[in-house]
Image (tube, helix red, strand yellow):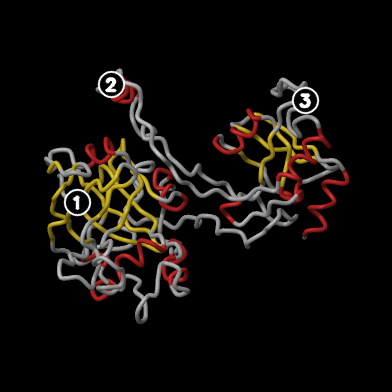
Amino acid sequence: MKKASMLVFRRITPADFFNIYKERGAEEGGGGQSYIDIDTSGVSIPDWQNFFSGISPTAKKGGPLWNFQVHSLGIGGSQSLKIGQRRSSSVSIREQKLDSLRSNRVHAWHPAKTGFPSPKGKLSSSADPQIAALIKGLVIFIVRATDGTYWAGWMREQDRPLAWSVPPVLDPLFVNDDGIIRFLNVLDFDETNLHWPFIVPGNSTSAPSPAPSAPAPSGAVPAPGTAIPKVTSQKQSKFREMTEAEAASALFDADYSAAPPALKEVITKVRERNQKAARALKDLYGACQITGSKYAFKKADGKPYLEVHHLIPLGLGGADAPANLVVVSAHIHRMLHYAEVTGLDLTKISGNELAIEINGEAHVIRWRPDHIATIIDAD
């Protein structure tokens, strides 16, 4: 049994999967990428420096490169592994392509050693149709123990048995694309368990706990008979697990430059939104469905500033349709995403109203009769 101090994780993407399994010569101009990228928006360079505290990196053209020993959960043994910055937007786990003379696949992520998902036959591209099923819910992770050792493992969230107790601090593993988790209170982990070594504090047997809410069917709308799933924010703050003193030190002791920040080009993917439905609902209500005009403010054109909230998040397959939308103020919208919300159970709607609590304070969502009818019709 060991104790975890930090954990870095990555949800495998189609590009990651293709890069580590493609054949030599699959790309013109050489072997192509052979690594797994982790976005610096999820794990920053200072995060990596903290994760590799005590290990001096090699200075490379793209940025720092760390060479360290990693053990594999469940199968033991150790191997040298390279992780380093490749460009401003990513840090990469190097030499992970199997069909390469320089292959150094982490043993815990090797299909022949642990059953890590692998394709049947040659992959045509990152859009190969077999990839989606193979990477569904697939998350790799590396744990730093308090003794300075590193341990790699992987999981598929849909395979999670009830015996996996999940402390709240590990929730990001199930909802974020990548990230770093710091344990203020060290978490025990069993180095003989490949997929879920974590032990809930004070519970050596890892008593069963409810599984995270499964993603809703694509295009889902809330219907009477089911509660709305609670979702953690997609990006966790790097200071979330720090004490106040640690956070202040990290902020004010940083070596900031007085020079203007450099420009960089960022390409992101966003979901298309049903702007027509959102505008119509805002005009229909003219106020927050929960607090009326209390937290609303007027825009320069004199109209109230309002937002729409998806009861079932788009990331969990929720529909961008009126039945899945409520009109709220910006303040309430942020609270619905980040505060503790209870009572979002549509079976409790009475008289077009639903009583909920936000951080323990009572609130009521109120629907127009014609709007609530869309929820009933969607059942």
Question: Mark 3 vs mark 1: which is more N-terminal?
Answer: 1
Q: Secondary structure at mark 1?
A: strand
Q: What's the distance in space between the residues labelled 1 and 2, CA to CA?
A: 33 Å
- The residue beneath circle 2 is 257
Mark 3 or 1, which is nearer the eye? 3
- The residue beneath circle 1 is 150
The residue at the far bottom in this view is: 121
Q: Residue at x 14, y 41 (%)?
A: 59
Q: Quadrant of residue 13?
A: bottom left
Q: Residue at x 26, y 50 (%)?
A: 143
Rendered-image quadrant of the C terminus = bottom right
Question: Mark 1 vs mark 2: which is more N-terminal?
Answer: 1
Residue 3 locus on image (x, y percent): 23, 46
Q: Name the amino acid type tagged 2.
A: Ser
Q: Name the amino acid type tagged 3.
A: Lys
Residue 279 locus on image (x, y percent): 76, 39
Residue 58 locus on image (x, y percent): 12, 43
Which one is nearer the viewer's eye here, 64 or 310? 64
Which one is nearer the viewer's eye here, 350 or 323? 323
Residue 5 sits above or below residue 197 on the image: above
Residue 200 sits above or below residue 191 on the image: above
Q: Is residue 13 left or right of residue 23?
A: right
Q: Secondary structure at mark 3?
A: loop
Residue 7 locus on image (x, y percent): 29, 47
Residue 28 sits above or below residue 172 on the image: below
Q: Name the amino acid type tagged 1.
A: Tyr
Query: Dot 1, crowdedness within 10 Å: few (<14), some or many (≥20)?
Result: many
How many numbered callouts?
Answer: 3
Q: Residue at x 16, y 56 (%)?
A: 81
Q: Quadrant of residue 6?
A: top left
- The residue beneath circle 3 is 303
